[in-house]
Image (cartoon, rainbow, N blue to C red):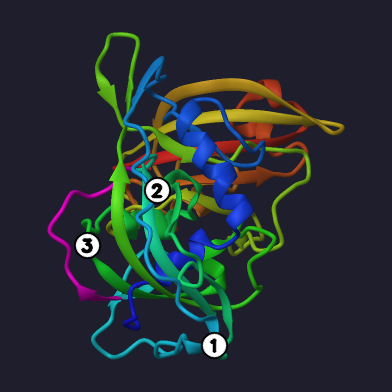
Amino acid sequence: MTVGAGTLRRTLVALTWLLECTLLICACAKPTNESLRAAPSASAIPVASEAVPQPPAKSRAAVARDSLKAPPLVPPADAITGAGGVHFQILRSGSGDSPGPVDTIVVDFSMWTGDGQLAFSSYPEAQPAGFSVSTLAPSLRVLLTQLKVGSHVLLWVPRAALAGWKPPAWPEADLVFELELLDISHVSVRDANGNAVEPVPALTPDAAGPPDSAERTRSGLRYVYLTHALVQKPPTSADRLALVASAYVVEGIEVKLLRSGFKTATTLTRAPGRLGELLSQLSSGDRVRVWLPKGEGKAIIAEAASREMILDLNVSF
């Protein structure tokens, strides 16, 4: 086994969790795990799906766990910096197709902690692992959808890049992955008019509040990324920001959809409340979930009144 293709593989980590993710592709719009689902973008509601059957995992000889060697634990100087501060290095460029955001992939991977401990690996099994790209943290999803079949990569993933997405079984640490992309099973989703649309994976909101790993604005507003833009470039005061948003309110332990997929536009100076502060930190193409404390949501949607509001927000400019 060659060291290197799998920072992304850490994402493949828990085998039980991976099996649940595979079911997600088969059902497409129906989640197999209540905390992870593939949701359409707010501006396009997919009504039909066509899934190519998942390619069979190719059997191979199992590799003894104690023979696996950790890759470099610190990214080299020539490593590329991607979304969310993830560093990656392509050891071998593939020549096949690239996966989409909700496609199923077959990979071989190993996940290491920053101190060189092996957390998970598919190599000791007789077959590679299969899972849905939609279950990955946004920063890893962006990277993976740029790879081609046959690629072998290393990834250095800071724990902050997994905010709100880290499976419970994963170590609470910076991670290093070695991953080889072996095969893809494509999923297509169409809108009511039969046009192909690109689904945007998203977590379903709950009443538990932001995770401990959620990021903060300067004033303490909590948010997590659902999708990272490929290019990180914040807006200027002159930019007109086009927003597509869905809003939820929290009532006890229940979360209710208040408004879905509404579109509006604003600028940094005209954005209500602390929304402008958040928007100033985003890039065109980012999608975030932000938790607004009780009473703050009504500055954005009057119906929120004094309730806590959760806002899923796409921004482009």
Regarding residue 271, the answer to whether it shows in the image is: no
**Residue carrying label 1:** 66
Q: What amino acid type is highlighted by mark number 1?
A: Asp
Q: At x 59% / y 57%, what residue is drawn?
A: 15
- In the displayed structure, 135 sits above or below 50; it is below
Q: Residues within 10 Å of mark 3 (few under 14, many from 20)?
A: some
- Say which element carries label 2: loop
- What mark, if any, has residue 150 been given in the picture? 3
Q: What amino acid type is highlighted by mark number 2?
A: Asp
Residue 152 lies in quadrant? bottom left
- Say which element carries label 1: helix
- Say which element carries label 3: loop
Mark 3 or 1: in front is 1
- The magenta segment is 89-100
Q: At x 33% / y 16%, what residue is drawn?
A: 191
**Residue carrying label 2:** 286
